[in-house]
Each structure stands twice: as C-alpha cells, then as structure tokens.
Image (cartoon, rainbow, N blue to C red):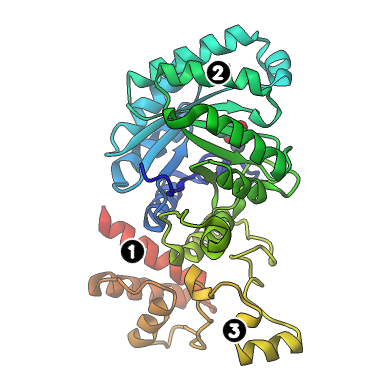
Amino acid sequence: MDKNRIIVLDTTLRDGEQSPGCSMNTDEKIKVALQLEKLGVDVIEAGFAAASPGDFDAVSRIAEMVKNSSICSLSRAIENDIKQSGLAVCKAPLHRIHTFIATSPIHMKYKLKMSEAEVIKRAVHAVEYARTFVDDVEFSLEDAGRSEISFMKEVMDAVIAAGASTINLPDTVGYRLPTELGAMVKELSDFAGDRAIISVHNHNDLGLATANTLSAVLNGARQIEVTVNGLGERAGNSALEEAVMAIKTRKDAFGDLYTNINTKEIYPASRLVATITGVEPQQNKAIVGKNAFSHESGIHQDGMLKNQETYEIMKPEDVGVYKESNLILGKHSGRAAFRDKIVHLGFDKISEEELNTAFEKFKALADKKKDVTDDDIRMLVTDESLNHDK
Ligand code: KIV
Ligand code: ZN
C-alpha cells in the first residue's frame, strides 16, 4: 500500500442518509453510487444492510452494479447484522464489512451496559465472524473521540489480531478540537504501525469536522470517511469536497499525500445528491455552495478581471463548476443547443444514442415545464446513462 495515498470512504448513502429528510429509495441510491464510482471514491458505504429489507436490497443492487469501488455495509457487532452485510456486499468484485461497538465510558455504561472485557469479547467475535464472509474488515471504536487511549489500544490489539485491517476512530459527537484529535491519531497510528490502516470519521457538531479530518491526515490517518455536501447525523459529517480539495490545493502542507478523487466530478456529485435528497447545500458552503465562486464587491471583481488568482485559490472548473451558459433551453431548442448544454455541464463522453434518447426526454419535459433547469438536464442525462448500463 502506497504510504502517501489517502483512501476515501464515502458514507453519503449510510451516515448521509441518516440526516433528517435525506432518505433515498433504491433507484436514487444506485444513481448516487454510480456517481461516487465516477468520482473515484475508494470505498462506498452503501448502507446498513440489516436495517430493513429495502436497505438490504439497495446494498445488494449497488454491489451488483459498481465495479471499481469497494462496496461496504455497516453492521453492529451482532451476528445477524454482519451476516446481512456479508450477503449483500459479496456480489461486488471489491467488498468490505464494517462493524463497530462503542468504547467510551459513557456509551459503555449507559447505552451498552457492558464492561470493558465484554466490549472486547464482542468486538473480537464480530471481527472473526465478519472474516468468515470477507477478507476486508473495518472495525470502528464508536465515540473514540471520548474514549480512553489505554482502552482503545487494548481493543485495537484484540481486533487486529482477530483480522481487522482498518481501524476507524470516529469522533461520533464532533467533540474534539483539531490539535487533540491529531494527537490521538498520532499516538494510535504509531501504536498500530503496519498492522492496520487508521481511519477517521468526524462529525460536525462544533463545525470542526473537516479541520479534524485534515489534522488526522497530517498525523498518520490514511483513510478518511466523508459525505457529499457534508450530509450526516445532526450537523453532518466531514464533507468530501472540502477534505479532498484541501489536500489537493495545499500541497505545501500535505506534501505528497493524495487521493484518487477525480475532482471534476465533485460538483456533479453535489448537484445529484442535492437534487435527489431535496437538501441544498447552504449558499456559502465551501466548494459546492452557490456563492463559492461568486464575487460581489467591486474591489474583488476588479482583482478577478486582472488575475483570477487574486480572489480564487481553486479553479472552478477543477471541481466541475462551469460558468452558466447563456443558453436557456425550452421546447423550441434544438439538438445542437441541447448537446452544447450537456457538454457544458461536464457530460462530454455521452454517446450519440444516449444523447438522442435524453433529447427526446428533454422535449417531453419542456412541453410540461416552462423552465428546464440545469439540474433537470443533469437528471435526464444521468438517468439515460444509467438505463444504458442496465
Ligand atoms: O459516527 C459514528 O460513530 C459512526 C460509526 C458507526 C462509524 O457513524
Ligand atoms: Zn457517523
């Protein structure tokens, strides 16, 4: 494994789906999963297979369709959860089971009502059982941010010996400051050495999720768990677009560290997730918000006209944001204008056949809807390439 490579695990379809109002049906989840594959995500956490028959079906169908990203399903440290995950992910060429149990004093005492010894026993059994289905097992110490280092070391030793190859340290309630989280990751990644990859999963309760993710990377974490648009429980998770673009943009700080993300697919992924969930990123959201590349003040506009780098540290096109084309599409628009628009939106590899069918669907929509928006067109084209892959 390349020591400079940062593995990106996207959990939009699991933790992201846990955001109020963000649940998705199976077809919608498949669309998001295929876009995550296009984005170059290494591991797609496709859901929690044991949560419901619908979740099981969604994870299994994603596992059948995605070829280039590993498909993972979350499971409590309970045999049936692990079994459902194993059965759902095994259809994917690359697959993983992710299992977890809480290790903080408050969770063990009040939620689990278990002693430290019982937690270790359950964790070891979960990993051993998961290994009967797959070779790649990730283990999470839930609420690691509020767990004791000495106990986490005991748990890590035990689950690594049982066969876990990734150890995830979630800051489940978004409690840690970047300096503290960095120190915890440094100590535990030195402790793990070459025995396991250290991963982080940061929540945003204090608005520090991405700062914590970056601090963890600088201190030895080699997997980051993130979501598109920062969706997730409560205040959300560390946003994929923020962590990836910080690592790419700040080469001076991150040196040779890199991700495999095709950053030009970031904005299309953000739009797809926003359109499907109906949850828009805030206007001033870093990277993907409506204002992220807009300049209002005269001084800024003047600087931009002289040199774009005066007020932009990233090129919008590097994250797939293209200046709005002036072409407004409606029922009188022709095929050439439609093609121009979709190329402009970043779909430059569409086949003639897909273009023709998408154009017919566009005409049908334009008959019903006065303003066909860029998001409508993105959905039409995404639907078309999806049908084509079936
Ligand atoms: O926030 C959390 O602790 C989680 C784990 C189950 C990975 O989502
Ligand atoms: Zn979480």
Mark nearer the N terminus (3 vs 1):
3
Quadrant where the image shows the N terminus: top left
Q: Which residue is mark 3?
A: 308
Q: Is residue 77 visible?
A: no
Of the two numbered discs 1 and 2 in the rendering, the one whose residue sits closer to the viewer = 2
Position of residue 363 measured from the top left corner of the image (x, y, whole percent): 39, 77
- Amino acid under disc 1: Glu
- Identify which residue, 114 or 390, lies in the foreground: 114
CA–CA distance in space, label 1 to label 2: 47 Å
Q: Is residue 252 above or below residue 13?
A: below
Q: Are marks 1 and 2 in contact (CB under 8 Å)?
A: no
Q: Residue at x 45, y 21 (%)?
A: 160
What label does residue 384 carry, if any? Answer: 1
- Amino acid under disc 3: Gln
Q: Residue at x 28, y 69 (%)?
A: 354
119 sits to left or right of 1? right
SS category of the residue bearing label 3:
helix
Position of residue 201 measured from the top left corner of the image (x, y, whole percent): 58, 39
Q: Which residue is mark 2?
A: 155
| Neighbour tally class for label 2: few under 14, some 14-19, many 20 plus, Cα within 10 Å | many
Q: Residue at x 54, y 32 (%)?
A: 190
